[in-house]
Image (cartoon, helix red, strand yellow):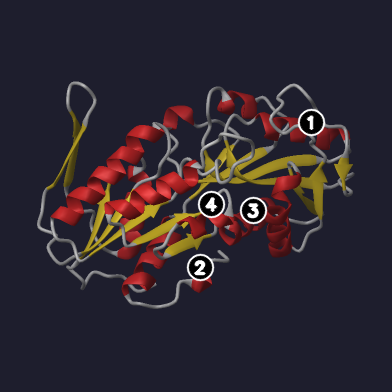
């Protein structure tokens, strides 16, 4: 991948949510992270200053909208405002994890569509482009009237699994009916069949589904999802698969949200290994024995390089 060392008019900024990934992206692109100061007033208001000239520059701001979600979202919006007022040529936000994405439609009366609200905030703030990874729902791209480069971690995760754990005699499992499309795409990469947990109440943490659609007996089951939040759904799916005769159960997901006691729950579950990306920073204190993390730094770095060179990013959408 060609680096951008010879392009001083390209600037990368990292906010507070995921410094390790920002540094990985910086190495992949070949440009050091630029200086910005992010502080808080005594009442928790966010104060940001850009510590170098960016007049006429192509700016990339890296920030995952992860826990603490509201603070990280406001940091991103305030940073965009600062950069715009400092006369940047273009403002590109790199959002490895797009928070508030689960409310992408009105599932019942009088509900907000927060995924659209966040998109509106970013557009009104003056963002020119969004680069993101594995949105909870593909239609979120349509909430924007600016370019959105929606990268995928499928190939990266499938290749990692095949190299590290081998993929013979495996079956790709969707933990509920809503994730079938995601499971099918992953199965195509590993040339494996799919199965579906017949979970009629995915939000109910007390009910263990009894039925599995597809054959998992005597096979290695790989549960594929876009995110792991509380891990209730995954651990329940693992129990169901073991009862159905699966020899081993693995979990693969892009975003490690890990709310509440998710890490403890996963460590004590029937799952052999939990494989995620670093789209959300996982502090060392929050890591556990079964966890394996795959970096998406080079994926984002290549996307930024292609965007700068005005080349197609399409080849990365299947990654």
Residue at image coords 69%, 63%? 189
Q: Is residue 218 above or below residue 27?
A: above
Q: For residue 161, which numbered disc appears in the image? A: 3
Secondary structure of the residue carrying numbered label 2: helix
Local packing at callout 2 (Cα closer than 10 Å; few below 14, some 14-19, many 20+) is some
Distance, label 2 to label 4, CA atoms, is 15 Å
Residue at image coords 89%, 48%? 215
Secondary structure of the residue carrying numbered label 3: helix
Secondary structure of the residue carrying numbered label 1: helix
Residue corresponding to mark 4: 135
Residues at badges 3 and 2 in contact (C-beta under 8 Å)? no
Q: Earlier in the sequence, mark 2 or mark 1?
A: 1
Instruction: Give the quadrant of residue 33.
Output: bottom left
**Is residue 16 visible in this depiction of the protein?**
no
Of the 4 image quadrants, the one containing the N terminus is bottom left
Q: Earlier in the sequence, mark 3 or mark 2?
A: 3
Q: Earlier in the sequence, mark 3 or mark 4?
A: 4
Distance, label 1 to label 4, CA atoms, is 27 Å
- Mark 1 or 4: in front is 4
Q: Position of residue 171 (x, y in %)?
A: 79, 52
Residue corresponding to mark 2: 316
Secondary structure of the residue carrying numbered label 4: loop
């Amino acid at each position: 991948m060609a680096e951008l060392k010879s392009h001083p008019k390209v600037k990368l900024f990292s906010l507070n949510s995921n410094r390790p990934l920002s540094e990985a992206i910086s190495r992949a692109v070949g440009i050091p992270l630029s200086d910005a100061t992010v502080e808080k007033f005594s009442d928790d208001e966010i104060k940001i200053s850009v510590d170098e000239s960016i007049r006429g520059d192509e700016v990339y701001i890296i920030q995952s909208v992860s826990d603490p979600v509201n603070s990280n979202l406001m940091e991103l919006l305030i940073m965009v405002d600062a950069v715009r007022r400092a006369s940047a040529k273009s403002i590109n936000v790199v959002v490895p994890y797009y928070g508030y994405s689960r409310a992408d439609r009105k599932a019942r009366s009088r509900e907000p569509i927060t995924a659209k609200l966040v998109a509106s905030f970013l557009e009104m703030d003056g963002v020119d482009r969004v680069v993101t990874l594995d949105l909870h729902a593909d239609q979120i791209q349509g909430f924007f009237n600016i370019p959105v480069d929606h990268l995928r971690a499928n190939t990266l995760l499938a290749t990692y699994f095949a190299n590290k754990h081998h993929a013979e005699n495996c079956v790709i499992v969707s933990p509920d009916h809503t994730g079938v499309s995601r499971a099918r795409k992953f199965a195509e990469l590993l040339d494996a069949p799919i199965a579906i947990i017949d979970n009629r109440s995915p939000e109910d943490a007390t009910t263990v589904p009894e039925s599995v659609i597809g054959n998992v007996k005597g096979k290695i089951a790989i549960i594929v999802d876009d995110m792991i939040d509380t891990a209730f759904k995954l651990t329940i799916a693992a129990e169901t698969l073991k009862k159905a005769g699966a020899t081993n159960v693995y979990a693969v997901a892009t975003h490690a949200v890990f709310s509440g006691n998710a890490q403890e729950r996963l460590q004590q579950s029937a799952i052999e290994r939990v494989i995620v990306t670093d789209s959300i920073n996982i502090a060392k204190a929050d890591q556990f024995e079964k966890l394996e993390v795959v970096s998406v730094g080079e994926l984002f770095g290549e996307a930024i390089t292609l965007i700068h060179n005005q080349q197609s990013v399409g080849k990365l959408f299947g990654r």
